Amino acid sequence: MNLAQNLVATAAARPDAPALRVGDDSLSYRAFLDRAEASAGLLRAKGVQPGDRVGLILPNVPAFPVLFYGALLAGAAVVPMNPLLTDREIGFYLSDADVKLAFAFDQLPDGGAAAEKAGKDNDTDVLVVGATGLSDEQLDDADAAEHTETEPHERAADDLAVLLYTSGTTGKPKGAELTHHNLSSNAEVTASFMLGEGGDDVVMGCLPLFHVFGLTCGLNASVLTGACLALLPRFDPVKTLELIQAQRVTVFQGVPTMYAGLLHTDGAERYDTSSLRLCASGGSAMPGEVLRAFEDKFDTMILEGYGLSETSPVVSFNMPDRERKVGSIGIVVRGMAVRILNEEWEELPTGEVGELAVKGDGVMRGYWQRQEATEEVMSGGWFRTGDLGRYDDDGYLYIVDRKKQLIIRATTSTRARWRRRCTSMTRDRKSTRLNSSHITI
């Protein structure tokens, strides 16, 4: 099993269909695969072995998808990083993940200097690449063509595909180990309710691809279905509206701040956004007034979902063919299960507030080289999210708070305070408002 098999299959079925667009430039699925295969050849020429980690320090430019799938084709695991990290921060990722080789973007403000310095400090080879990926000179210098293969390197379903570091609220970032099965299954279930089967969708790619929301719901789901991903290196409301109009975007994926930015853009009504058929929101709670105003202004529907880096990410979603409940994170998606637990791992009845625990196809296999941290949040395949929520009588989920915010310095025991707060939330649902800054999809 290899997640990259989706690209191989789509390139065979829709070779001339547009896969990636940036401005007026377009890359077909055949060209996408060709460049990914060439990248895999370079990695092999550089000594990257199956299971080695490859770093991507890139924004939303074609180089990211090309090198991402190139690494997977070679059997490597990918470590995505925010391209605006400092050299010290990049150095932590390179060291902690034992990255064999990393790619950085040549059009960053520092021209990739921070990544190169971090590479030297950590004995990691760093290649600086352009917007489309490796240059012909880089490929020729490495004799990449001699190492190129046309089939993805065989991997097991539970082999590591992506090591995605979570920012966390305390301590150093932890790498969530996402497997080929985790990411394949989540892309499939996401595509089943978000994208059409014919490959005719154009997906707005303004969510960072180094983040799990953009990676799975944007890139991997698009590759699976043959949709086109319209990339935007940096979110800007005006440029986004221009792109929606020019590329006839059908599916917009964003976080609430993006929707608010589009809503309050002067002259937004001048752009033709009639192609939009579905908008998906995650990352934090969508204020009801923003949701309603956006839908009225742009004549489209916003559906909210929930997930985390550790769950690949989608756990629940408001389905387009079912009743939507504003303020709810929807129903649990296929292949996943959610329980509401107390501190003793006991399941609570419908309506009571407790901690969400998730089990299923998308749940990570653990934190990279953090056995103690893994054992703190996982037991029997169940992952404790740290988010407090409840079910309603129709099976819809609601997030009401973040557990870690309730742990305060006081003479009262943390456990007793946690129980009292959950009980209070269950009684007074009007007061259960998500503090959304800690929720990620």
Image (tube, rainbow, N blue to C red):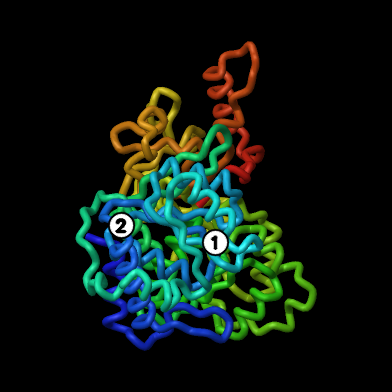
In this rendering, position of residue 231 left or right of residue 182: right
- Element marked by disc 2: loop
Between the C-alphas of marks 2 and 1, the distance is 26 Å
Of residues 96 and 425, the one nearer the viewer is 96
Residue that mark 2 sits on: 48
Of residues 147 and 269, the one nearer the viewer is 147
Q: Quadrant of the N terminus?
A: bottom left
In this rendering, position of residue 195 left or right of residue 432: left
Name the amino acid, label 2: Val
Q: Residues within 10 Å of mark 1 (few under 14, many from 20)?
A: many
Name the mark on residue 208.
1
x and y percentages locating residue 254 in the rendered image: 58, 63
x and y percentages locating residue 294 in the rendered image: 67, 68
Q: Residues within 10 Å of mark 2 (few under 14, many from 20)?
A: many
Name the mark on residue 129.
none
In this rendering, position of residue 170 left or right of residue 222: right
Q: Residue at x 55, y 27 (%)?
A: 423
Name the amino acid, label 1: Pro
Q: Residue at x 54, y 67 (%)?
A: 60
x and y percentages locating residue 51 in the rendered image: 28, 51
